[in-house]
Image: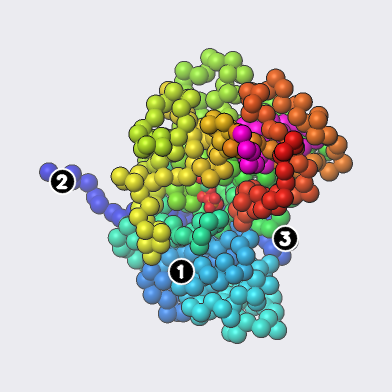
């Protein structure tokens, strides 16, 4: 027997409709490429996203056509989020940190029809436009009078000029909620990038889940600063969840240095911020020497790569900011787990609570997970056994765009490529990415554990642990270290620093290699493949 409730497709247009109707005067504040602060409201986002939809109609874009962006976090990007998807086109956010050849490759693969870009990325567009064979219109996110006269890009259009010609009225179409709404390419560290193609349904379900108290805990009382980029996995879904909750949004634009982020948090009374560890490293690095405090920031969600314990304690103990450690991936929209305590943990000591907070967290309703051994059997949730982490749920990929890479699932589960433990309370902890795992004498060593200890040293800015070939042990770990500016530490002092820390003696790295920088990928993650190439002539001590 069918239930007798109304059936309405879950569409992204319903989010902006809701935000306009019920939170019309909540603010959206953006630091612009132009340098100034721009402010307006959800009501304005709604009106201008309808102008975006009319613009796309006037450019003769069809249903399901891909519309690309190369843009920072800002209000115009937000309008595109709603205008493009709401009108039935697919928003393809491109990561501007990718190599231009990769940008060409993915724009052609996605068959992007229009590309909207922030003026900071004009040089990229100049480098790629002639090779992007499907793009018919290049639109600069600026006023008509800011368009460069001699850009070399044929028929370069101004976003503001286009929108200015369009009415603010538009009837959002209704269609199947399983239609594609946006897409994001993985960074493709091995082989060509593959795209996750999100649907309206997956996006809305993810936005609901992300807002839950034990997930990101977002509300109409929050002022949210997504430092995590809108060009990668939809800024963890925050633009959608903010519309769904009616929160104030604060966008940092291109200014991601510690000083700018701090000033924005204070000026706009930000209560909630989200970003990857490297961004917070810059923020804390600015605050400490300048003796600064937060007056409104309460919580920050940190994910994308393992959050070092030293960062969690610094936020918590020094600044009274709760850190929510999160784990996810492009293929998961991206949220999979978040680390919040359970009722039974409330009476634990601070030290014991911290042990839990360091983990990547427990599954959100909508995501099921399991760990499996090499033979494919499921491993126990004892917090010790570690194996390949598999997930499934309504916002996790079934297959990649254009079937690239074949069927990624195994018995309906998506293999994440991460290696993890799960404890009896369901808290998952990543020990490594499977391709970075270090195997020494038949035992596995967690590179994350080794890195966390190194970055807890006051002189260390960044650390990356990799395995080096060893005739007896197969591999032995070494740690590549970037020193903080002006700080000094020797190899011996750092190795000594491992004593008495939570690693067994045989897990302590064999060597410390000081490097100027650790190569980072387009999403700010350490590129260990590149690091291993850098160290190809390296020999372990004594060999
Ligand atoms: P890409 O590596 O293609 O940039 P994603 O941005 O989707 O892909 O990153 C997903 C991966 O990032 C995860 O599979 C995991 O290895 C890593 N990751 C994300 N969050 C965390 C975290 N909190 N701790 C450790 N690793 C993380």
Relative to 405, does residue 331 appear above or below in the rendering? above
Please report whichever mark, 3 or 1, sits nearer to the chain's N-terminal start.
3
- Quadrant where the C terminus is found in the figure: top right
Few, some or many residues within 10 Å of mark 2 (<14, 14–19, 20+): few
Q: Identify which residue is drawn at 60% across, 33% down.
A: 473
> CA separation, marks 1 and 2?
39 Å
- For the residue pair 43 and 396, the one nearer the viewer reads as 396
Few, some or many residues within 10 Å of mark 1 (<14, 14–19, 20+): many
Q: Secondary structure at mark 2?
A: loop
Image x and y of residue 509, in percent: 69, 33
Image x and y of residue 517, in percent: 75, 49
Q: Secondary structure at mark 3?
A: loop
User: Viewed as shown, does residue 122 lie left or right of 245?
Assistant: right
Residue 13's image quarter? Answer: bottom left
User: Viewed as shown, does residue 418 lie left or right of 455?
Assistant: left
Q: Which mark is residue 36?
A: 3
Q: Does any portion of residue 262 appear in the rendered image?
A: no
Q: Nearer the viewer, mark 2 or mark 3?
A: 2
Q: Nearer the viewer, mark 3 or mark 1?
A: 1
Image x and y of residue 170, in percent: 41, 69
Q: Which residue is mark 2?
A: 2
Ligand 1 lies in which image quarter? top right
- For the residue pair 393 and 46, the one nearer the viewer reads as 393
The magenta-colored residue range is 449-472
Q: Which mark is residue 110?
A: 1
């Amino acid at each position: 027997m069918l239930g007798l409730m109304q059936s309405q497709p879950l569409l992204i247009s319903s989010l902006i409709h809701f935000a306009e109707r019920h939170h019309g005067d909540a603010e959206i504040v953006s630091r612009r490429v132009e340098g100034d602060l721009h402010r307006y409201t959800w009501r304005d986002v709604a009106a201008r996203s309808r102008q975006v939809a009319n613009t796309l109609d006037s450019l003769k874009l069809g249903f399901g056509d891909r519309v690309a962006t190369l843009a920072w976090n800002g209000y115009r990007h937000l309008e595109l989020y709603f205008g493009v998807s709401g009108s039935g086109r697919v928003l393809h956010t491109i990561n501007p940190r990718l190599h231009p050849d990769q940008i060409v490759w993915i724009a052609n693969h996605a068959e992007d029809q229009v590309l909207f870009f922030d003026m900071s990325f004009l040089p990229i567009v100049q480098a790629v436009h002639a090779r992007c064979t499907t793009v018919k219109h290049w639109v600069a996110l600026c006023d008509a009078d800011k368009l460069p006269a001699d850009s070399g890009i044929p028929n370069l259009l101004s976003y503001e000029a286009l929108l200015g010609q369009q009415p603010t009225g538009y009837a959002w179409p209704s269609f199947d909620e399983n239609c594609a709404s946006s897409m994001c390419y993985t960074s493709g560290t091995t082989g060509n990038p593959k795209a996750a193609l999100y649907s309206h349904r997956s996006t809305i379900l993810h936005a609901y889940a992300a807002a839950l108290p034990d997930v990101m805990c977002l509300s109409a009382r929050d002022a949210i600063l997504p430092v995590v980029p809108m060009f990668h996995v939809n800024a963890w879904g925050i633009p959608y969840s903010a519309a769904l909750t009616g929160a104030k949004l604060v966008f940092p634009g291109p200014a991601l240095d510690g000083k700018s982020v701090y000033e924005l948090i204070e000026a706009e009374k930000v209560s909630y911020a989200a970003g990857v560890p490297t961004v917070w490293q810059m923020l804390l690095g600015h605050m400490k020497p300048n003796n600064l405090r937060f007056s409104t920031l309460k919580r920050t969600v940190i994910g994308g790569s393992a959050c070092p314990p030293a960062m969690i304690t610094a936020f918590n103990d020094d600044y009274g900011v709760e850190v929510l450690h999160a784990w996810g991936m492009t293929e998961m929209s991206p949220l999979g787990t978040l680390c919040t305590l359970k009722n039974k943990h409330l009476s634990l000591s601070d030290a014991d609570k911290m042990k839990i907070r360091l983990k990547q967290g427990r599954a959100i309703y909508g995501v099921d997970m399991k760990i499996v051994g090499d033979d494919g059997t499921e491993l126990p949730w004892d917090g010790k056994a570690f194996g390949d982490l598999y997930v499934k749920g309504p916002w996790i990929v079934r297959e990649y765009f254009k079937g690239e890479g074949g069927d990624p699932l195994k018995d309906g589960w998506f293999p994440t490529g991460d290696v993890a433990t799960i404890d009896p309370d369901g808290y998952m902890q990543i020990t490594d990415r499977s391709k970075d795992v270090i195997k020494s004498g038949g035992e596995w060593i967690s590179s994350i554990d080794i890195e966390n200890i190194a970055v807890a040293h006051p002189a260390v800015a960044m650390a990356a642990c990799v395995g080096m070939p060893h005739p007896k042990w197969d591999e032995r770990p070494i740690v590549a270290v970037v020193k903080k500016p002006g700080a000094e530490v020797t190899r011996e002092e750092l190795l000594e620093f491992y004593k008495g820390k939570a690693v067994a003696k045989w897990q302590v790295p064999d060597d410390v290699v000081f490097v100027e920088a650790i190569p980072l990928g387009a999403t700010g993650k350490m590129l260990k493949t590149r690091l291993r190439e850098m160290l190809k002539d390296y020999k372990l001590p004594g060999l």
